[in-house]
Image: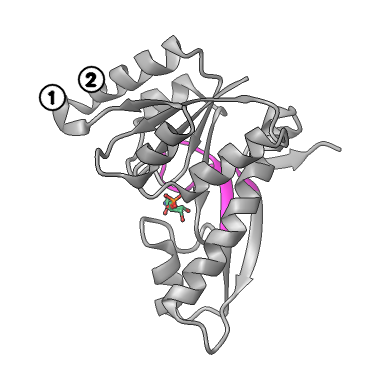
Amino acid sequence: MNIAVFASGRGTNFSAIMRAVKKGKIKANLSLLVCDEPKAGVIARARRAGIKVALVKREDFVSKKEFEEKIIQHLEENKIDLIVLAGFMRLLSPEFVNRYKNRILNIHPALLPSFKGTEGIKDAFDYGVKLTGVTVHFVDEKMDHGPIILQAAVKIKDNDTLETLEAKIHKVEHNLYPEAIRLFVEGKIRIEGRKTYVLT
Ligand code: GAR
C-alpha cells in the first residue's frame, strides 16, 4: 500500500508517521509528501529522509479544480492508495473527497465535534474546557466532520499554559495517528454510516 501525506506546516506528524513506517509498525510505503506551502518545515523533513515531495501551490492555478487535478496527477503517478492529512490547511472539494472516498484520513487536535477549524488547541484552551484531546477521522465533504476512527483525551490542568497544552496534544497525536494508519493499512477498520468499528 502506498501512502501520501498532505501537510502545510512543521511536519511533526509527518515525522511520527515516517518513524512508524521505518520501524515496520505501519506495513506500507510512505511514497509522497504533498505540500502547498513552499516555506513549510515538512519539506526539509521529507527531503532529508529521501521521500518524494510534490509542492503544489494554490496560487499557481486559476481554479481549485485545476489545483486538485495537479495533485491527483501526482497521486496517480505514485499509485497512492491512502491519503493522510497531517496539518494540511485546505479544504478538499467534494469531487476530490469522493474520488478517494474512505481513503483519506485526517487528524484534528481536539475532541470532535468540538473545536473544529484551524485553532483547535487554542480554542479549547480559551473556552476553559477541562478535557480536550485528539481525533483521527475519515474525511468527508465537510470540515473536521467524517466518521471518527480513534480519539484520545488530554486533561487541561490549572497550571497548563497554551504552550504546555500544545506539547501534550502533539505527543498524543504522534502515537494516535500512526496507530490509526496501522489499523487502516491492516484492513481493520469497518465503516457503517457515521460509525467505525475496529476489527479484532
Ligand atoms: C497538528 O496539530 C494537527 O492536528 C493540526 O495541525 C497540526 C500540524 O502539526 N491539524 C488541524 O488543525 C486540522 N484542522 P505538524 O505540522 O507538526 O504535524
Image spot of residue 79 (x, y percent)? 51, 12
Image spot of residue 189 (x, y percent)? 72, 34
Crowd tier of the residue under label 1, counting other residues whose Cα lies within 10 Å: few below 14, some 14–19, many 20 or above: few
Question: Which of the 4 image quarters holds residue 191?
Answer: top right
Q: Residue at x 64, y 51 (%)?
A: 176
Depth check, front residue: 21 or 192: 21
Query: On screen, 55 above or below 70?
Result: below
Q: Amino acid at mark 2?
A: Glu
Query: On screen, 32 above or below 169?
Result: above
Q: Amino acid at mark 1?
A: Val
Q: Using the image, tell me which numbered label, if any, was put on residue 66.
A: 2
Residue where numbered disc 1 is placed = 62
Question: Which of the 4 image quarters holds residue 183?
Answer: top right
Asked if the residues shown at circle 1 and circle 2 are in contact, with their CB atoms under 8 angstroms apart, the answer is yes
Left or right: residue 193 versus residue 162 is: right
Dividing the image into 4 quarters, which one contains the N terminus? top right
